[in-house]
Image (cartoon, helix red, strand yellow):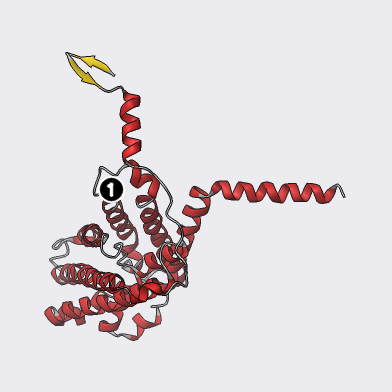
Amino acid sequence: MSTKDGVATADDEEVTDIIVQRVPYWDPPAVQPLDTNELTEWSLYRAMIGEFTASLILVYVSISTVIGYKFQSSGADERCTGVGYLGVAWSFGATVSVLVYSTSGVSGGHINPAVSFALFLAGKVSLARAVLYVVAQCLGAICGVGIVKGIMKHPFDSLGGGANSVSEGYSLTAALGAETFGTFVLVYTVFSATDPKRTARDAFVPLVAALPIGLAVFVVHLATIPITGTGINPARSLGAAVLYNQHTTWKQHWIFWVGPFTGAALAVFYHKIVLRDIAVVKEALLALGSFSRSGSTT
């Protein structure tokens, strides 16, 4: 303890100790993947309602923005009107940020089947919860797009319904790669922003998780809108496909499930194995090396 201008102040090391004591860090234990006990708990179904509502709001706001932008810029002399790609990307990113912050205390704020799948692979949620979340998210997205179609029926039908498809000049492989990498960026950000170690260190910043997740959605949309319209959320893609209901949309729809789920799995591997559990990998390699050496001496 030292004094400055007659006022007692704590040394830097003491302050650090106090902060560490206030925000201890530990990794929560993995959830049992086949656990079904929570199926009898109201909290699970309340979380499903939260995921349904959040998905509905996300898709309503974002698809409305997409249709509104296309409608405003459809005239030959009005190509520079409307919010533009930047506004569309911002509508997705900002809405995700708001909804993650609002629903994280109820359901974890997944709002995306790819995120729920990733958290299941990482042992954060059970299979039953992940499946029910995906169902709720998809139903919410369908209802959200249904509201948009009811309000903006003519422009919705004539301007593509906000459905994802591969843009002219791009191959299916390119579109799949864009969806995979875009979802990898999103899920990697989700895991990094919600990492227990980071949460403990930055616990005094209440928006620390919601902001980077929303910004990840924003920047991925900027990069991917010209290629696929940006899916990275199978529920969003499904909702628009169901209400728009065109053959071309359904023919390419698999891209917007395979790509996001592949990107999510890669992000889980990268974060859990490469970044967080590198010691486990080293131990396995050392054990393998010692086994090989012992085998060669016999």
User: In the displayed structure, does residue 155 sit left or right of residue 131?
Assistant: left
Q: Observer-nearest residue: 192 or 252?
A: 192
Q: Horizontal and vertical percent for residue 73?
A: 16, 67
In the displayed structure, 196 sits above or below 222; it is: above
How many numbered marks appear?
1
Q: Horizontal and vertical percent for residue 236?
A: 29, 72
Residue 132 visible, this angle = yes
Task: Identify residue for label 1.
Answer: 208
In the displayed structure, 143 sits above or below 183; it is: below
Q: Amino acid at mark 1?
A: Val
Question: To which quarter of the image does residue 161 belong?
Answer: bottom left
Q: Observer-nearest residue: 95 or 202?
A: 202
Question: How crowded is the residue under tag 1: few (<14 C-alpha within 10 Å), some, or many (20+)?
Answer: some
User: In the displayed structure, does residue 291 sit left or right of residue 276?
Assistant: right
Q: Horizontal and vertical percent for residue 69?
A: 17, 67
Quadrant placement of the N terminus:
top left
User: In the displayed structure, does residue 73 sit left or right of residue 284?
Assistant: left
Give the residue drawn at x 34%, y 30%. 16
Q: Observer-nearest residue: 192 or 235?
A: 192
Residue 171 visible, this angle = no
In the displayed structure, 65 sits above or below 40; it is: above
Give the residue drawn at x 44%, y 68%. 261
